[in-house]
Image (cartoon, helix red, strand yellow):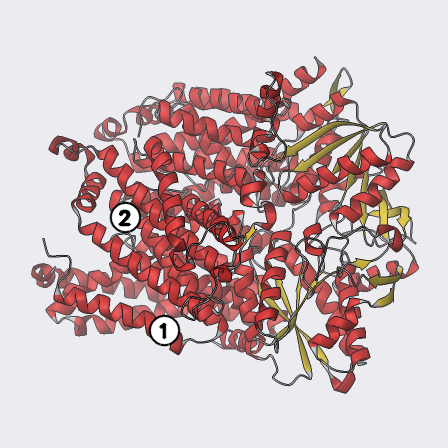
Amino acid sequence: MNAVINRSRFVLWGSVAILFVLLPIVFSGGFELSMLSQMGIAIIFALSYNMLLGQTGLLSFGHAVYFGLGAFMTAHAINYVHDGGFAFPITLMPLIGGLTGLGFSLVLGFVTTRRPGTPFAMISLGIAEMVAASALMFTTFFGGEGGIVTDRTSGGAVWGVSYGPQIQVYYLIAGWCFVSMALMFAITRTPLGRMANAVRDNPERVQFVGYNPTRVRWLMMSLAGFFAGIAGALATINYEIITAEALGLMASGNVVLMAFIGGIGQFWGPIIGAVLVTFLQSALSNYTQAWLLYFGLLFLIIILYSPGGIANLVTMHSPVVKAGLVRRLIPSYTRAVVSSLILGVGVIAVIELLYRGAEAIGVSPLVSWLTALALVLIGAVMLAKSSKKVSQLWDELSPALAKWS
Amino acid sequence: MEFFLITLLNSLSYGLLLFMLSSGLTLIFSMMGVLNFAHASFYMLGAYFAYQTGLFVGFWPALFLAPLLVGLVGAATERYGLRAVHKFGHVAELLFTFGLAYVIEEIVHLIWGRAPVDYRIPESLDFTLFTLYQTQYPAYRAFMMLVSVGMLIALYFTLTKTRIGMIVQASLTHPDMVQALGHNVPRVFMLVFAGGCALAGLAGVLGGNMFITEPGMAFAVGSIVFVVVVFGGMGSLIGAFIASLLIGAIQTFSVAIDLSFVDVVSALGISVDPDSFWYGGLSITISQTAPVLPYLLMVLMLIIRPRGLMGTRES
Amino acid sequence: MKITTLILIALTSLLTGCGETKKEIVIGYIEGLSGPFANVGEMGLRHLELEVDAVNERGELPEGMRLKVAPFDNKTNPQEALLAFRSALDAGVDYVFQGNSSSVALALSDAIGKHNQRNPDRQVLFLNYAAVDPALTNDRCDKSHFRFDADVDMKISALTDYMASREDIKSIYLINQDYSFGQAVSRAARSMLQEKRPDIKIVGDDLHPIGKVKDFSPYIAKIKSSGAKAVLTGNWGNDMTLLIKSAKQMGADVDFYTFYAGAAGGVTVIGESGIDRVYQITTWHSNANAETKSNARTYADRYPDAPESLYYSSIRRAVRMLEKALIETGSSDVDGIRSSLSSMTFTDDTGPISIRPDNHQLLQPLYLSKLISVEGMSEMVDVERTGLGFETIVEIPAENTRLDTTCQF
């Protein structure tokens, strides 16, 4: 086993840190800064989710419960500070969210982690439904429809940091995001992290070796709840409002999409997923009403053709790069990319025509429909051909790649 | 008495509708091990197809056509979607249906718009069947029950008396053995999936005009059918049947109980301050929680007896 | 490829075309334009575009100013709404229109208040056309927020006034969705009825989870066994239509007093089962007078394919009062517009209306109307082409809707 910190890893994490510092200098607009902050929160949340799904093999449909409960507790804590109840720096508020998430996942995890697989997924769904329903009923704690409003500047300015301007909040989120990422990565290298992988792959063997798979699952779930709570707390600080939607089924479903699109097989997969999904949700919705449909289609395509997510696509090619065979892939890849672009443009045109109607775009309906359908047809035929080529090529290359993978 | 009888009838018709929805899901779930998240979407498709075909041919032909169409969509889903994902394991299959539910809902938006469509109960069934005390009992509800019971019987005979039914039944409990005996299990899978979807579609045809046909209807029933299936137990149609009726009864009867924790303790002579932090939670009545009680039941069942009420195996 | 280029051009112009010169005043419409409530968002957008086009056509704005609508999707989620608000700011929006979901409205009101406080030279106003949580003009009021709909308490006050005057109503059943709005309806109805007609018995007070009930028949059975003849409900969407349909099927002879029977798709789904038994309390309905009828027809002519009929008088009033403020102050300075709006009086199709300076709530007449069949009545306007329409039962004068406020700017 490699040491947790070696040289290349040091360089990698160092450049991540530098990237976090430099990003707001490039993207300084109000909307961009908000989006970066949102991405930071999503990264923590998606990584914490992957501690369950990717590392321990627990499919949860209720992870937003811990995110939301952490967020609400933080909101109350900030308000308590505001009212002079006690003094606690805003910078460390995410700890309160994290501990809340930890507390709830310890309790709920104790009863739910005895069975993996479908029973666990269903229990998590049931708990999510119940928590979401009670969030609307218990207005004292959850604030009803209006949610709980806070003022992140409550703590006053410490060394000139008041958390009024968004840029300061961004750096707070970036800092916590970096620390959480590092911690979650470190956990994958601990014996617990390794045992979690073993529990995922073969719980019976784990039992033979003398470990208790239920306990491993429980511990992993508690830790996941902790980080989800941190993400929730950061969301409270970022938005200064938290409502019951944050712990609803939609939020839980969203994090499943993030982790899976990014790839649950690699530690960094969910990071890609979180960034991409957040970007698509915010940016795409500015362009088209059909963004949910595109989003669903993207998800289906990934499950059908690359169930390891985007991360898997990347790792699949690392032996090719190492073997120096990239050049052989380029021609057929270009063809495949071009044909899927044509198909994609055609599909998008069809969907947009359906949503807006040709008149709204200002082109004649007949011409536009014919063009769109022709694009779909041509694209589909070309893609079918070129993808066959690509898979043939992979078959040819595989003997040469064997020693590199 | 009036209230009790009427509520009993209502709970029965609601329970039977639930059973129609969940029987297909149970078959699929037990056979393929996949909880089909998109099952309720097929229920929605059933309602929309019935509405659309009904515009051209009327309600009665649509009653048969719509489930058939839904079955075809289901077969295509299995053949070109699920089967491709199968090799990546159950999680991928489950997530595929999860994504499919999103896409179906958006496609329904795209075609029929977001507002509810005007899918009505046919005039020939829009009358009062009988009047119990002062409450009228609509004929359509009785028709719904009739169809559900008819379906139950048909399903029972198909499963027990036909060859394909035997294979399906054997696959429910011993999928590996069936495969070892040389049956074309993928095709059985496809048929079961299509059949299950068609049953959901039939429920949609009946439920769509009884309640409401709009793009959110799938989401609204989506998780409750899981509850029925999980509660009833894997591989057990009887379990699903009992669970459907039970959950139908719980949901309808608990509405009548206006009792809260505060009432209970105040009957014991303890008063709770209405301004206290916990009052909001303690004063919730049973009737308020009625629609979420099934989830509580499901969680408890999974914790105490993960195989469900009548289940034969866990996964 | 031509289409996509066209699409792209159309989209980019939509996004980036927001002008730098203050000749163009940008109204940011921050609503749910995707997801389950998108139809309501699109419907509001059509209302807004109709009014904005009318303002530009009249061309009475000073110095050749024009209004322009920029839609932003908030996905009916408070946090997404804040993100949408940021991009609205980047796009140069001065006036934010929003109304669906009080939770989004509270979040926006709060965020816009904080923004105005932190950026004194870049003020933004929030014109709320439909969010009815009383908190917005009471405990959580903000001087940049204006409400053009009437809040829950105002509507219930009007409704209970009417019920108190009906000697034949002896008992009432309350059924509401279990969240802050439904709970507020239940609370307010209880206390106001108690005060106005202590002899009316409240025979039931049900709260059910929002959007979770598929079969309302047990509730109807309960209502029937309680013997109530009147049901007061704040339910909207499916929770309302299913309730009314279920009552019809079980032959329950009760009247429904609602807030949102006439809202998007409601009448279509209720259909004949609601005739003569569904009442609604609103700030406007199409058969209030000759002028409202002609406005409703204008809307139907402009959007022949739209599923809905004219519904939001609040959007129309907000745009027209904004127009008046711009003409009166003669500049686009937002501070000036705010103080001009703060105590503005105006005459619209239902008569004189005015904004309260102490909490920025529009005072306007309220209408209690009943759903009837207008088949064959050529002078009446129907809703959503159903042949059904509303007729006025009572008109409550604007001044009678004034309630105490706890607001302090």
User: What residue would you read off at disc 2?
Assistant: A54
In the shown orientation, is residue B43 left or right of residue B189? right
Work out whether residue C219 or residue C112 is closer to the camera in this orientation and state it. C112
The quarter of the displayed image where residue B232 is located: top left
In the shown orientation, is residue C367 left or right of residue A66? right
The quarter of the displayed image where residue A276 is located: bottom left
Q: Amino acid at mark 1?
A: Leu
Kindly give the residue lying farthest to the top in the view shown.
Answer: B1
Q: Amino acid at mark 2?
A: Gly
Residue at the spot x=83%, y=51% of the render? C382
Q: Which mark is residue A23?
A: 1
In the shown orientation, is residue C206 left or right of residue A138? right
- Secondary structure at badge 1 equals helix
Q: Position of residue C216 (x, y in %)?
A: 66, 31
Q: Which mark is residue C252?
A: none
* Residue A321 visible: yes
